[in-house]
Image (cartoon, rainbow, N blue to C red):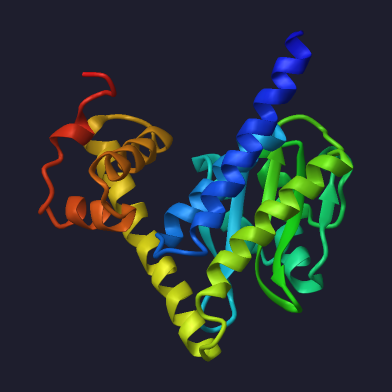
């Protein structure tokens, strides 16, 4: 009975995730929130410990735009700095890249060392692609050596595909310059969000993950874009009291 209920609950969560992402195809949407939601859904639905996302900027270079935890964010940043890692290979080849046990991995020595320092033992990368156009890659992190099942990988790829369609569909009739401008806006928003996250963490004396969770919660509760909440905090135009208090108070 419990197994059946668990299966039903997982199917319900899966349907809800695709419905949320499909909604972006018919209405204006917050790209940053969409991408963070993608990472959260991967953790919830695929049983991974963290997820991170890289997208191309207007120059065609990969940038970190989302991560479900601060540790994953740091690993993604290091991957770009070291110019080696599964996401980079995934983006370059437009094919999934798997590293089920970083303890025996030799393809990316610098990345592997840093990922293991942050507590990750396995990484799987999936491409963000649509009909030959690749705009980024999704990283799935495990704290134990893990060879993901084919069904889990298919679900992960489907989530990545829907997110890619959501980003590209609205601009299917425009030039690529408009697409990269929109993606650049998301990257610029990420910089402001990182500043706000650090500011809130210092003022509230909390961890970076908790600071980010409070920013997202406040954005949802007030119906405000995440980047606008972050900008209001950094520019001191936002009442920070609700953000400084622990949830539930």
Q: How many callouts does the rendering have?
A: 0
| Residue 184 appears in view | yes
| Residue visible at 58% across and 43% down in the picture | 17
Between 43 and 222, the one nearer to me in the picture: 222
Horizontal placement of 101 versus 197: left or right? Answer: right
Q: Position of residue 184 (x, y in %)?
A: 44, 75
Between 70 and 150, the one nearer to me in the picture: 150
Horizontal placement of 51 versus 203: left or right? Answer: right
| Residue visible at 72% across and 48% down in the picture | 156
Q: Position of residue 35 (x, y in %)?
A: 52, 55
Horizontal placement of 174 versus 239: left or right? Answer: right
Looking at the image, residue 131 lies above or below residue 27: below
Looking at the image, residue 39 lies above or below residue 134: above
| Residue visible at 23% across and 31% down in the picture | 204
| Residue 85 appears in view | no
List the single residue furthest toward the top. Answer: 1
Residue 113 found in image quarter? top right
Looking at the image, residue 84 lies above or below residue 182: above
Q: Which quadrant, please, contains the C terminus?
A: top left
Q: Which quadrant, please, contains the N terminus?
A: top right
Q: Position of residue 19 (x, y in %)?
A: 56, 48
| Residue visible at 38% across and 32% down in the picture | 210
Residue 103 found in image quarter? top right
Between 150 and 142, the one nearer to me in the picture: 150
Q: Position of residue 198 (x, y in %)?
A: 32, 45
């Amino acid at each position: 009975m419990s197994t059946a209920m668990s299966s039903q609950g997982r199917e319900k969560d899966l349907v809800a995730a695709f419905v949320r992402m499909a909604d972006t195809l018919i209405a204006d949407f917050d790209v940053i929130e969409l991408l963070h939601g993608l990472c959260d859904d991967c953790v919830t639905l695929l049983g991974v410990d963290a997820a991170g996302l890289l997208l191309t900027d207007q120059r065609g270079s990969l940038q970190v735009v989302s991560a479900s935890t601060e540790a994953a964010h740091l690993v993604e940043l290091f991957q770009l700095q070291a110019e080696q890692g599964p996401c980079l290979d995934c983006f370059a080849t437009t094919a999934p890249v798997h590293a089920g046990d970083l303890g025996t991995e030799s393809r990316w020595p610098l990345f592997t060392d840093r990922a293991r320092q942050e507590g990750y033992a396995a990484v799987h990368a999936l491409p963000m692609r649509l009909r030959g156009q690749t705009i980024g890659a999704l990283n799935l992190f495990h704290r134990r050596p893990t060879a993901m099942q084919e069904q889990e990988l298919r679900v992960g790829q489907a989530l990545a595909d829907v997110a890619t369609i959501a980003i590209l569909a609205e601009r299917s009739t425009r030039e690529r310059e408009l697409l990269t401008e929109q993606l650049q806006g998301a990257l610029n928003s990420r910089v402001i969000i990182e500043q706000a996250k650090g500011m809130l963490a210092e003022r509230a004396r909390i961890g970076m993950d908790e600071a980010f969770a409070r920013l997202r919660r406040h954005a949802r509760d007030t119906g405000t874009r995440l980047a606008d909440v972050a900008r209001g905090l950094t520019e001191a135009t936002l009442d920070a009291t609700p953000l400084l208090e622990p949830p539930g108070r």
